[in-house]
Amino acid sequence: MMRIKYFSSIVLCSFLLYACTGSSGIVPNQSPVMILAHAEKELQRGGFKKAILQLTTFNANYPLSQYYDQVQLDLVYAYYKNNNFSLALETIDHFLRLYPDHLNLDYIMYMRGLIYMEKDNNPIQTFFGIDRSDRDPIHRLSAFNSFSQMLHNYPNSQYAIDARKRLIFLKECQAKYELSVAEFYDKRRAYIAVVNRVDKMLIDYPDSNATHQALHLMENAYRQLHLNAQADRIAKIIATNPV
């Protein structure tokens, strides 16, 4: 995962002083460059809790610093890596209010997408191979919208390739969710609802495997509604588009 680098020449000059501090890396009345040096050191070594402490200390003591925007970028990353997703999103919102035209908005949008993907994830269910496609898709849709916005505004961003791969994955996940809804309606013999749901899938996710599976539900729904001409049309689509 790439992270924004900043003021490297200044920070590197301060690393030699790092060993003179306590275990938290913070000493009273230290300079802003020293705080950032300690934070950078912790980020590099994976000490995200300590980095967060140092970066929030910087925010409190130096709100008008020339490095303030860069500190917010590192805070977003540190919160994300420390699984503080709500705080990461709050920091992103704060950043966007302060810097609506910042050069690193592509990074912020990309990180917002990653965070929402993690909020949609359940590590325990993933470990046991449980399909979560039928769960509430609110975070998944937020991730999809974040990546889509980033690619629309910054198609040549260094994060664009990964964002496109994630969009493909999210599309398939969302199509599976729509399929689970169509199956729910089918079990309850709500055939008009089945047709409407699958029709929407054909518009939003035409190339998805889940959409192809949903066509069988649509064909059956039309037959149950005695709309055989429409059912035959769907049957031909299924036959000419084997998985």
Image: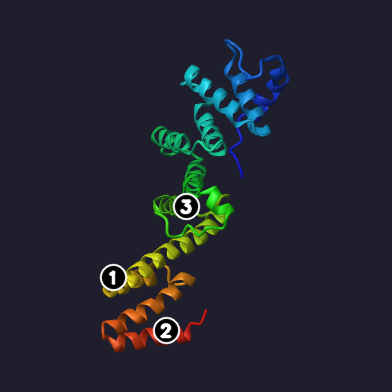
| Label 2, label 1: how far apart the Cα atoms are | 20 Å
* Quadrant in which the N terminus is drawn: top right
Query: Label 3 belongs to which residue?
Result: 147
| Foreground residue among 49 and 146 | 49
Secondary structure of the residue carrying numbered label 3 = helix
| Label 2, label 3: how far apart the Cα atoms are | 32 Å
The amino acid type of the residue labelled 2 equals Ile
| Label 3, label 1: how far apart the Cα atoms are | 30 Å
Image height of 222 relative to 27, above or below? below
Tell whether label 3 touches label 2 (CB within 8 Å).
no
- List x then y, in percent, for residue 206: 43, 72
**Which residue: 46% across, 86% down?**
239
Between marks 2 and 3 in the image, the one whose residue lies nearer the viewer: 2
**Which residue: 63% across, 30% down?**
47
Secondary structure of the residue carrying numbered label 2 = helix
Q: In the rendered view, does 163 fall on the left or right side of 25?
A: left
Q: Residues within 10 Å of mark 2 (few under 14, many from 20)?
A: few
The amino acid type of the residue labelled 3 equals Phe
Q: In the rendered view, does 94 fall on the left or right side of 11?
A: left
- List x then y, in percent, for residue 149: 43, 52
- Is residue 208 visible in the rendered structure shown here? no
| Foreground residue among 139 and 125 | 125
Image height of 99 relative to 159, above or below? above
Secondary structure of the residue carrying numbered label 1 = helix
Among numbered discs 2 and 1, the one appearing first in the sequence = 1
Q: Which mark is residue 193?
A: 1
Tell whether label 1 touches label 3 (CB within 8 Å).
no
Between marks 2 and 1 in the image, the one whose residue lies nearer the viewer: 1
**Which residue: 30% across, 82% down?**
222
Q: Which mark is residue 237?
A: 2
Among numbered discs 2 and 3, the one appearing first in the sequence = 3
